[in-house]
């Protein structure tokens, strides 16, 4: 997505990370290397924890990002859980800055689904769609049938790729299913649907329909 923005607008696009609770934008920023965002450690202490146990993880491990504010007075925050999943790195950056770097958020701990024993984040599905030329217009439907999780993903085709030939659609579904299995480790059932057929909402799009929750199943 960033490559498309840069190509079409003739600019270089940089990621900036921030939270309203901390200070808004500017908590972390990319340098010209675009290999992660440098966290302003003179203002914030960053940690990575196991989102389930709260255990602090070593630098380089993937987990939930936690911040402590060093100079906020009216609204100080101690070990604030962002719910964002990422990785911190102390690897030397060629730009010369020594602030610790964070990856782009890889997902959110409160968005995580456990399907057939595997942790699945919607952001992983978006990454596969973008890497395979699809727009990120999709919907995940999870259910449980005969004590086994079912995992379906409806994906909108682009107008220019839409075809009435069933064989073409089936082949594209199989290819996308293979890419999803490589990323997720489990096989979803892919359904390519006509453009603009997935319901839009006025707020955030409803990406996940987890019917197991209606059955009282802990997910």
Image: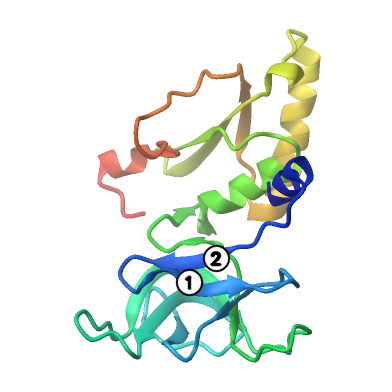
The crowd level at tag 2 (other Cα within 10 Å; few <14, some 14-19, many 20+) is some
C-beta proximity under 8 Å, tags 2 and 1: yes
Q: Residue 38: x, y in percent? A: 59, 79
Q: Residue 93: x, y in percent? A: 74, 85
Q: Residue furthest front?
A: 10
User: What residue did someone put label 2 on?
Assistant: 16
User: What residue did someone put label 1 on?
Assistant: 26
User: What is the distance, in whole Å, between disc 2 and disc 1 at their CAs?
Assistant: 6 Å
Where 38 falls versus 194 (above or below)? below
* Quarter of the rendering containing residue 96: bottom right
Q: Is residue 106 left or right of residue 75?
A: right
Q: Tell me which label, 2 or 1, sits earlier in the chain.
A: 2
* Quarter of the rendering containing residue 83: bottom left
Q: Residue furthest top?
A: 164
At x 56% / y 33%, what residue is drawn? 137
8 or 219: nearer the eye?
A: 8
Label 1 secondary element: strand
112 or 181: nearer the eye?
A: 112
Where 87 falls versus 212 (above or below)? below
């Amino acid at each position: 997505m960033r490559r498309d923005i840069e190509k079409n607008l003739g600019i270089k696009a940089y990621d900036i990370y921030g939270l309203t609770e901390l200070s808004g934008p500017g908590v972390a920023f990319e340098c010209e290397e675009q290999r992660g965002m440098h966290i302003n450690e003179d203002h914030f202490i960053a940690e990575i924890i196991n989102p389930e146990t709260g255990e602090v993880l070593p630098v380089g491990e993937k987990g939930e990002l936690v911040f402590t504010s060093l100079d906020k007075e009216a609204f100080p925050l101690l070990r604030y859980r962002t719910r964002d999943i990422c990785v911190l790195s102390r690897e030397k950056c060629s730009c010369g800055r020594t602030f610790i770097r964070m990856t782009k958020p890889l997902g959110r701990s409160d968005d995580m689904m456990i399907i057939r024993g595997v942790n699945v984040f919607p952001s992983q599905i978006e990454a596969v769609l973008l890497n395979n030329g699809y727009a990120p217009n999709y919907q995940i439907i999870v259910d449980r049938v005969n004590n086994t999780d079912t995992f379906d993903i409806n994906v909108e085709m682009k107008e220019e790729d839409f075809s009435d030939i069933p064989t073409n659609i089936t082949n594209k579904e199989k290819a996308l299913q293979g890419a999803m299995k490589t990323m997720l480790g489990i096989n979803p059932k892919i359904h390519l649907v006509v453009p603009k057929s997935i319901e839009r909402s006025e707020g955030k799009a409803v990406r996940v329909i987890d019917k197991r929750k209606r059955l009282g199943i802990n997910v």
